[in-house]
Image: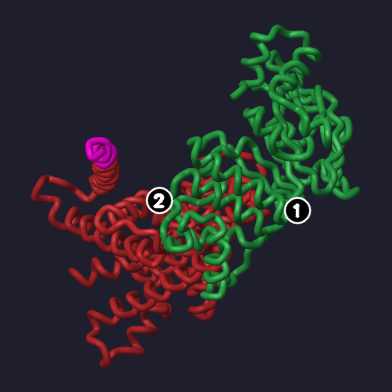
Amino acid sequence: MIQIKDVSMLFNPGTVNENLAIRNINLKINEGDFITVIGSNGAGKSTLFNLIAGTITPSQGSIQLNQRDITREPEYKRAKYIGRIFQNPLLGTASNMSLEDNMMITYKKGFKWLRRSLNNRMRDYFKTELVQLRMGLENRMKENLAMFSGGQRQALTLLMMVLSKPDLILLDEHTAALDPKNAEIVLELTDKFIKEYKLTSMMITHNMSHAIEFGNRLLMMDKGEIIYEVQGEEKRNLTVEKLIDKFHQIRHTSFENDRTLLAED
Amino acid sequence: MIEGILVEGLIYGIMVLGVFITFRVLDFPDLTVDGSFPMGAAVMVQCLLLGYNIWLALLLAFIGGVLAGVVTAVIHNHLRVPNLLAGILTMTMLYSINIRIMGNRANVPVLKQETILSRVSELFSGIIPEDYVLLVFFLIVTLVIKVLVDLFFHTDLGMTLGAMGNNEQMVISQGVNPKTLKTIGVGLSNGLVAVSGAFAAQYLGFADVGLGQGIIISGLASVMIGEFLIMKSNRIGVLTFCAISGSILFHGVMYLGRYYGYVIKMTPNDLNLIKGVLIIMLLVITQAKKLKKMTGSVVAK
């Protein structure tokens, strides 16, 4: 479905800050894949997401979606079929607007016209969908999102993104800024929605056991490269220890370093 | 006296609505206002002199303002110029353009021509006491514009504009180009400002290239007074009401300064100083309030 071909990303070329953040990555994302991505800070995970989402354009290589070249398509156009959730739970919703207004804005992607779509039928629809979150938000439709917790807002962002049925969803450590209890809830919801709506997805996580537990494929990134990829049966038999060993084998760095690099939980 | 303040407050209230849209809804501090306000006045007066239909003249003034706003937005969007600078650029260019619109003059009076105001006065003479005709008229005009603005912000497009001022990434994620939204928002805002300028010119009886000087500060002060005195809310109807009330209060304060300022040895030349000090005072008070709220919540825990 998505084909990333020989993509490299060079920041600040020709300066002292020159930084090859992505080195010649090739990746094919198939429909229905749930790919978890791990790697240390600066490994290029977020840069990879930025490239797929269109926040930045690669210095080299091409990105295709269903055989269509989207390498130079701006982010807001790609957003119609690529959904993304950020680590910061505030980025998905507007704080000074009510829950129902937020849901109306995110209900349909693309340019909005001078129509008033928010009516009682839409409100009822939103309420029934909100029940799935089991947070009681369906009774707080008129409240400003500033009144909601980070976990609630992230769950909401997730729900609204899922309802727009994107071709691919990118989860950029979307539970990292939440407290453990809320993180668990949002992660459970994520897994439930992905299975229920058969979404193709990629998830960056710093938690290795989550990376192993969820999804059908796992990518390990380091210094701008995908250094290890595992899927299917092999992934199901993976453990945190095996993963660290693998990293050790590939990179020949000391065990002490591994733990800091792959922040193990 | 009181109806004078009210009329002025209502006329300038239309401009304050425009300033409210850019500063508060879009979070786009737009200084084009200082140029689009006299532009509305210039277009209106020139059209009246040319004998155009008065309503067509008003429409042209609105369109002129929209174009001015669009220029600012385009400079900001496509040349990556900071929004403040983009506004100042347009404002500066408009100074020359406004003089051209007025036929290479800096001041054009409209004393003999029929204006919207003279037409209205004629129409209602005998029905409403003369002193109150303009007050009633502007009450209706400003109210209609306020309701239209409210309705706009209840549409899908209007709500998305509101979301952009709050969270640009969210709008991008919804597949909307924020540049398009900024162009629409800033254009609309300056259209309103120009309409306000067009009415001001008819009320004052002339258009002047310096009419817009410091108007952005008046607008901002009005928005802040409105927010300061009246309750916080997330309902657009309440917010626009606050903006217009703020404008009336602001003009009340200015009126006092103009006519009774001599008591404290103030001259009309000091008014700009007063405006600035007023805004600084409001900023200080709101920050003190915020700080109190924050420390207050810590104590409560």
Visible residue check, residue B105: no
Which of the numbered marks, if any, corresponds to residue A147? 2
Q: Is residue B103 magenta?
A: no
Residue B161, percent from left and from top: 54, 57
Q: Is residue B168 above or below residue B196?
A: above
Chain at numbered mark 1: A
Q: Which quadrant of the view contains residue A46?
A: top right
Visible residue check, residue B55: yes
The span shown in magenta is B292-301
Chain B palette colour: red
Quadrant in the picture for the C terminus of chain B: top left
- For the point 46% across and 68% down, the residue is B149
Q: Name the residue furthest front.
A: A237
Residue B249, percent from left and from top: 24, 60
Q: Nearer the viewer, mark 2 or mark 1?
A: 1
Q: Is residue A138 above or below residue B294?
A: below
Residue designated by label 1 = A198
Q: Amino acid at mark 1?
A: Lys
Label 1 secondary element: loop
Mark toward the start of the polypeptide (2 vs 1): 2
Chain A palette colour: green
Disc 2, disc 1: CB below 8 Å?
A: no
Q: Give B200 or A258, whichever is nearer the viewer.
A: A258
Which of the numbered marks, if any, corresponds to residue B269? none
* Structural distance between the alpha carbons of marks 2 and 1: 32 Å
Q: Amino acid at mark 2?
A: Met
Quadrant in the picture for the N terminus of chain B: bottom left
